[in-house]
Image (cartoon, grey):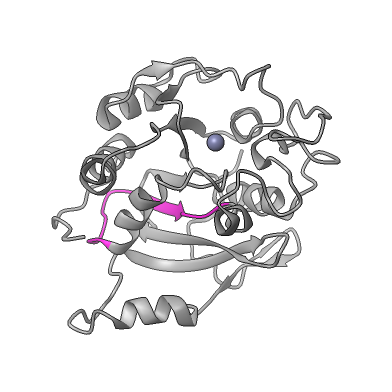
Amino acid sequence: MVRAPRGALVGTVLSGVALALVAPSPAEAAVVDSSPRTAAPRPAVVERVVIGHSRKGREILAFRLGDPDAKRSAVVIAAMHGDERKPQAILRNLRDGAPITGLDLWVIPSANPDGVARKARRNARGVDLNRNFPRRWKRSKRGPTWSGPSAASEPETKAMMRFLRKVQPDQVVSFHQPLYGIDTSGTGNRPLARRLAKHLRLPKRTFSCGSGCHGTMSQWFNHRLDGQLVTVELGRRPTKAYLTRTAPRGLLKALGGRRPVPSTI
Ligand SMILES: [Zn+2]
């Protein structure tokens, strides 16, 4: 697999869909403007990209942090299930904190923005996005884990696939809740899973998706691309200290990045 060049993604075309660098939305700009003392409100962010849109037309955003020329690269994803939102705080802490070095890091805080808006697991069509990927996809009944009418039928799934194919990250972490552990199934207990368990202070476990995993993002990524994807399940109620201090620091350490200046966020 040939790694895509590490240049900016601005203006590049992914499978016919343009990734565009965009200005902050009015809501986000308002947040940024609330801190007038800071000349660069998000000094860690070097690029902001709309990787696609949800079924209801909401933007799916990726923020590039750190050093685009670093040897190691990583993508961290949260809220693929819209009712599992606590891990978003970890990604926002990294995005809004001090600059990151030693790692080309992308964070996608809201992989399922329609689900997040409704505080619901599935997307606006009722599809469980983590059963919709085209690897061992299986038709299932409508319900909490509906896999959709066909593999990769959903715009959110397609956006994530395009983005991961383009970026070709060495490491991917996908955050969920509330099963509490690092999923070692399918990873062969590889180094990334071990480092995540150590630095995020979570047990290594094997999750079976209930009746067996079909069409998950980790199955697709780990079969089709060169990097490693590890699913991390936080507990139901992680503490604020864990989400804003322990986990961001631990995650960076596990992925090979550093944040030299302690963040005040
Ligand atoms: Zn989940």
Q: Count the labels in the image.
A: 0
Left or right, residue 22 beside residue 132: left
Answer with the quarter of the image where residue 257 lies.
top left
In terms of image quadrants, where is residue 232? Answer: top left
Question: Ligand 1, what quadrant?
Answer: top right
Q: Residue at x 73, y 60 (%)?
A: 55
Residue 227 pos. (x, y %): 52, 34
Residue lying at 66% horizontally and 54% vertically, measured from the top left: 159
Of residues 56 and 230, which is closer to you in this image? Answer: 56
| Left or right: 216, with 109 as reference point | right
Whether residue 167 is situated above or below residue 216 in the rendered picture: below
User: What secondary structure characterizes most of the magenta part?
Assistant: loop
Q: Seen in the image, is 169 located left or right of residue 118? A: left
Look at the image and tell me whether residue 67 can be seen. Answer: no
- Can see residue 27? yes
Q: Which quadrant would the N terminus be assigned to in this image?
A: top right
The C terminus - image quarter: bottom left
Q: Is residue 80 above or below residue 55?
A: above
Q: Is residue 120 above or below residue 186?
A: below
User: Horizontal and vertical percent for residue 184?
Assistant: 47, 19
- Where are the magenta residues, as a range? 97-111
Q: Report if residue 124 lies within the magenta region.
A: no
Percent from the top left, x then y, of residue 196? 34, 29
Where, by quadrant of the figure, is residue 190 drawn? top left
Residue drawn where x is 27% and y is 27% of the image: 201
In x, y percent, where is residue 3? 55, 46
Q: Nearer the viewer, residue 53 or 21?
A: 53
- Please tell me whether residue 103 belongs to the stretch shown in magenta: yes
